[in-house]
Image (cartoon, rainbow, N blue to C red):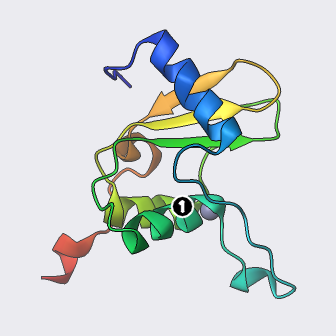
Amino acid sequence: MNHDLSAEQVQILKTQCLQGSIVTGANVENALYGAGICAERTAITRCIMEGSKELQAIAILGDSAEPISPCGICRQFIREFAPKVPIFMFSGKNDDMVCKTLEELLPMSFGPEQLQ
Ligand SMILES: [Zn+2]
């Protein structure tokens, strides 16, 4: 995906993720796995609760060798609340980064328009 951020700004974004200086979320596990919630949805929910409905970007950082991508439920959640923002996916083990649009991650998605 083309985005307007420089390599330095992308690195700052990753650093802010690591430091938690931006609205962050974390996986909240539950013994009943289906009742857990992913970090992406936690962070977006925090944004909404705190009145920040205009997200600028989403950054996802996992403890994996490959850049980590949002699960299917989170892709659908992003579709509802931040369908146009760049989604930066980082590896926590190295400098690998992938940036995609939601359209690339969730083509032919279902959204509020289909409910009208
Ligand atoms: Zn998820």
Q: Is residue 65 above or below residue 11?
A: below
At horizontal 48% and vertical 29% (from top left) the residue drawn is 99
Taking the image as shown, residue 49 lies to the left or right of residue 34, namely left
At horizontal 34% and vertical 63% (from top left) the residue drawn is 81
Q: How many marks?
A: 1
Q: Quadrant of residue 47?
A: bottom left
Q: Quadrant of residue 97?
A: top right
| The residue at label 1 has a CB less than 8 Å from ligand 1 | no
Q: For the residue labelled by badge 1, is the local secondary structure a helix, a strand or a loop?
A: helix
| 94 and 116: which is toward the camera | 94
Whole-percent x, y for residue 72 in the image = 56, 62
Residue 109 appears in the picture as rendered: no
| 72 and 61: which is toward the camera | 61
Whole-percent x, y for residue 29 in the image = 80, 74
**Label 1: which residue?**
43
Q: Is residue 88 above or below residue 21?
A: above
Quadrant showing the N terminus: top left
At horizontal 57% and vertical 58% (from top left) the residue drawn is 40
Whole-percent x, y for residue 21 in the image = 58, 43
| 52 and 55: which is toward the camera | 52
Residue farthest toward the left in the current orientation of the protein: 116
> How busy is the neighbourhood of tag 1: few (under 14 within 10 Å), some, or many (20 plus)?
some
**Amino acid type, mark 1:** Ala
| 12 and 35: which is toward the camera | 12
Taking the image as shown, residue 98 lies to the left or right of residue 62, namely left
